[in-house]
Amino acid sequence: MRLSQFYLPLMKETPADAQIASHRLMLRAGMIRQEGAGIYAWLPLGFRVLKKIEQIVREEQNRAGAVEMLMPTIQQAELWRESGRYDAYGNEMLRIEDRGGRAMLFGPTNEEMITEILRAGAKSYKDLPKLLYHIQWKFRDEVRPRFGVMRGREFLMKDCYSFDIDETAARHSYNKMFAAYLRTFARMGLKAIPMRADTGPIGGDLSHEFIILADTGESAVFCDKQLIELAIPSKDTDFDGDLQPIFDRFTAHYAATDEMHDEKEFETSVDEKNQIAARGIEVGHIFFFGTKYSTPMKATVAGSDGKDIPIQMGSYGVGVSRLVGGLIEAYHDDDGCKWPMAVAPFHVGLINLKTGDAETEEACSKIYRALSVAGVEVLYDETKARPGEKFARMDLIGLPYQIVIGPRGLKDGKAEVKQRLDGEKSEVAIDDVAAHIAGLVHAALEYE
RNA sequence: CGGGGCGUAGCGCAGCCUGGUAGCGCAUCUGGUUUGGGACCAGAGGGUCGCAAGUUCGAAUCUUGCCGCCCCGACCA
């Protein structure tokens, strides 16, 4: 993509409203534009990151055996009256009326709808288990939206729902999502730690929040350092096999958010040198809730004895849009974003330092074409801006690699390559740079 | 939802106290000089001062109401 064709409205100055790094940088880097409290338009650059994250989530859901579908954003109040949540949900639910005066709502979540869908189509225990998910915009009329997309009112979420015949089977579904989440966040370059979460009236040990550590995190978290070093389940994990060892391995060490924190247990069960007390951002939440919806909504299947059994359910969310902010919190410096390759809006930024110069233009064009052919996503800055401005904006948007072509290097047949993550610069022969970078990009996109 | 604050040009702000018809920096446009880390000179465009009533000869400025946004707290993917 040529920068002159892209839409990238950057801000040199910091908007007064943005308090935390991710919000500030997303505004400055032209990723989002606020359209209302907690409501954002995704500009081209931000949209590309959002889609990359969404795709990783999708691939890992699919790998775990979940099946994608799409439910609407607008729901009928009637459905929510069945579960009793229409009145219980409170002011967080955005209520709407259609022209016929019917009560509608903008979905804050989809348990009722998916239950209705399964109820209509699953009649026998032979139709279970099922894992269904969608990636859809939600709206929760938060009392206080803040921190940009980290805490918006409208947000993109992946929510998966499991349907099982009994608790044993439900635990297996839960473990699938547990393992899938470990992989999902790891692929984005995030260390997400599963932490015990409140299970409410259901009880049991089947609710976990996945937390990434960040100084600006919303809640205090406490965990054992060993958790951070555990190996993530590999690509060839058999999701139909026994996943309990994975679950056990990741839940063997202490990890809790402040509301579940037990200081005494923390101090006695975790070596002092391994005690981590930090701030965290919740990026995923998995939850087994049994028959909470299936019973009131009469979602049952016939068991082997012919008797109706309410379906055992769980739900599994990932905050896709929130992750964009979370990733910046984890990867940035004073100059801007530092995207991990897997979620970077473009893999490489190509800078022509002297637009209008026949030689630098020709060199850039060649590199641009070679990289494109190699499947590398390039943002090519061929604008007339001054060098300093080009460097600064490339740092701001944070593409993993920058290739800098100027008369000075060209004279020696060299291109300059800068790695955004560590700022390391190197010189590469102009004829080799495209292949060299393509190799680095492809290597960085490999995962286990 | 309690407490606090703010709405003046795309962004950041001053002017308001003490009413007299709007200004600064950055950005934008034109011309010129520059050209390896957010240039310089000269010129230009851009604002019904959030909205509505009221007070007044006259309101960005004073009064009232409404709307919007932000921050702290309680709550949440």
Image (cartoon, coloured by chain):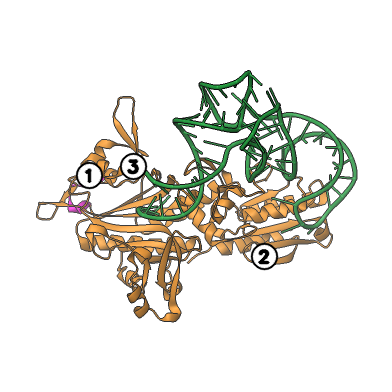
Categorize mark 2 by other alpha carbons within 10 Å: few (<14), some (14-19), many (20+): few
Residue A145: tell me if it is visible.
Answer: no
Q: CA distance from mark 1 to mark 2?
A: 54 Å
Which chain can be seen in orange? A
Which chain can be seen in green? B
Q: Which residues are magenta?
A: A118-127
Which of discs 1 and 3 lies nearer the camera? The answer is: 3
Residue displayed at 39% across by 43% down: A141
| Cβ atoms under marks 2 and 3 closer than 8 Å | no
Decide if residue A80 is on the left or right side of residue B4.
left
Q: Quadrant of residue A281?
A: bottom left
Q: Circle 2 marks a residue in which chain?
A: A
Mark carried by residue A423:
2
Mark carried by residue A91:
3
Numbered circles on residues, count: 3
Front-most of A427 and B3?
A: B3
Q: Amino acid at mark 3?
A: Asn
Which of discs 1 and 2 lies nearer the camera? The answer is: 1
Q: Position of residue A364 (x, y in %)?
A: 74, 52
In the rendered image, the vertical position of residue A88 relative to residue A317, given as above or below: above
